[in-house]
Image (tube, rainbow, N blue to C red):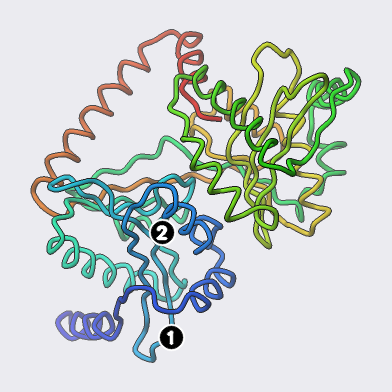
Amino acid sequence: MYSALKAVCLAQVMTMHVEELKNGKEWETFLERSPGGTFYHSLKWRKVIQMSFGHHDLYLTMRDENGTIIGVCPGFIRGRRRLRIYDSMPYSECGGPVIARQSKKEASHTLQSFLRSFCSNKGIIYARFCFTDAELGRFFRSPLGYTETTRGMVEVDLKVAPPAFLWKKIFSTNLRRNIRLVERRGFQAQEARTKSDLRDFYDLYYENMKYLGADPYPYEFMENVWLVLHPRHLRIWLLEKDKRVGGILVLKDGKKSYCVYAGLDREQRVGIVNYLMWKEIKKAEEEGRRYVSLGSTPSDPRNPYYIQKMRFGGSFCQQQTIWHPIDSTGCILLLTRAKTFSARKTIRNLLPTGIRRTLEGRLSRF
């Protein structure tokens, strides 16, 4: 009985196949119909990365025995010589395959089989994926790999909690007061219209990242985001009075706004980011979007950035970042990474709460 069942399952896997992207329209249509599809999976974002970093892309589609697309997996090959990896997706807050619900297990196994063969022939040592779908992520875990669960996404569902409800029932008195205070002090929010506006935002973003101890993306990356996506899929909010003091960069598609990068003048004592996220929530409802993502967030409920974003009435979606080894070199590197991360986590947990929060706050990107 067991052998017969195993043979049937193997036959189901063998009827599926993986191929490199051929039909862009089909890819985008599949994403639009898939709950797990995000803006980062789109071919528009692929163009931004291609223009900015020059990595070789490997965008894969999975098909059933009838040739119907049942899954997609975007990614890029990064690194050189013996340290090349398949990364889905670099420079993104979401990544990994998107697979139709009824085909998750079989398509996952088929994709991994394809990647093992492809990567071995290309000298790629491991693959990296990021999942918010816990079930799908489980199919990609490996005993020789490494899984990290330190970050997630905070997302506001405007159908469940529209702005008027958030303001009256969810926001604290302090949050409403801080938002009102920005306008009372004479600050105004404007949408970026020109490349000069983009430059102003980048300068604020650059200084903010340096303050946090993080590495900012180069201006050329932001410029390509602007060139490819503005205005249909990109909005930049700028807050100003006598000068620009803050801004957030928002990606947008038909169903969701993504608050991605923030810049602010640290000398200003007003709630810049809170105010601009509130502006985007109201704008998203006006434009008919259902969701607003408030960006990548540490998983620790004690983290100040986690607390700040959850005050907006969102839900926390845990992410799994999975490193999957392809060869022995990949296994060794991932084992080293896992031990290093474990040691760092142990040391961090030994620190007093106040110092730990300060360090996590400074190292958080947003």
Residue beneath the point at 24% across and 83% down? 14
| Nearer-the-camera pick, 66 or 244 | 244
Image x and y of residue 135, in percent: 41, 59
Q: Is residue 334 above or below residue 103?
A: above
In this rendering, position of residue 353 left or right of residue 316: left
Residue beneath the point at 37% across and 17% down? 349
Q: Tell which tag, 1 or 2, sits nearer the viewer.
A: 1
Residue beneath the point at 16% across and 39% down? 333
Image x and y of residue 345, in percent: 33, 23
- The disc placed on residue 135 is 2
| Quadrant for the N terminus in the image | bottom left
The CA distance from mark 1 to mark 2 is 22 Å
In this rendering, position of residue 46 left or right of residue 19: right
| Nearer-the-camera pick, 118 or 160 | 118
Element type where label 2 sits in the image = helix
Dot 1 corresponds to which residue? Answer: 68
Tag 1: amino acid:
Thr
In this rendering, position of residue 113 left or right of residue 295: left
**Which quadrant holds residue 199?**
top right
| Quadrant for the C terminus in the image | top right
Image x and y of residue 195, in percent: 66, 41
